[in-house]
Amino acid sequence: MEKWVAYALVSMIFAGFTSVIAKMGLAGISGELGLTIRTLFVSLFVLGFAAIAVPTGEYLLLNRTNILWLGLSALTTTLSWIFYYKALKLGDVATVALIDKGSVVVAILLAWLLLKEVITLRVLIGGALIVGGLLVMVKKA
């Protein structure tokens, strides 16, 4: 297995835990406050990770383009998290998490449009299955 696949699988497992643990942490408080507290912890953990894992010379490689795109990514992450926590506070974890994972389809389309990544038959079928699963999960019985 390629290293990036292993990393993605570990990420998937932690993301699954994240949704359930966050829902438990929202008991009795607003999604907004929960998101704020979570984000403070994430910031501290990431800063600690960077202090350990990022060689100091690498900071000199940063340029305006890196900062612009990473800043825009932070903005979209913030907006995603705000609405995710609002949904998580009100909805079932499994349904909210699956709808959120529909972002894969958005990412596929944006990667095709902006990065000129190829949409293969495998990617097309996978995306269609995600959309199909999404429709099954959000339909009320």
Image (cartoon, helix red, strand yellow):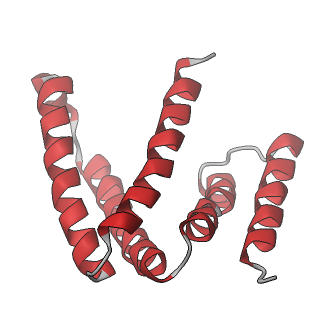
Task: Work out which quarter of the rendered image holds the C terminus and state it.
Answer: bottom right
Q: Residue at x 14, y 42 (%)?
A: 47
Q: Which quarter of the image is occupied by the N terminus?
A: top right
Question: Viewed as shown, does residue 11 lie left or right of 46?
Answer: right
x and y percentages locating residue 9 in the rendered image: 56, 33
Q: Quadrant of residue 86?
A: bottom left
Q: Position of residue 3 (x, y in %)?
A: 53, 19
Residue at the image point whose x is 19% and y is 66% from the top: 37
Which residue is drawn at the image coordinates 13% and 48% (left, top)? Answer: 44
Q: Is residue 77 visible?
A: no
Q: Can residue 94 be seen by looking at this rendering?
A: yes
In the image, 37: left or right of 70? Answer: left
Image-quadrant location for residue 32: bottom left
Q: Nearer the viewer, residue 20 or 72?
A: 20
Q: In the displayed structure, does residue 114 sit left or right of residue 70?
A: right
Q: Is residue 101 above or below residue 44?
A: below
Image quadrant where residue 96 sits: bottom right
- Residue displayed at 32% across by 73% down: 26
Q: Which residue in the rendered view is the most extreme toward the top?
A: 1
Q: Nearer the viewer, residue 133 or 65?
A: 133
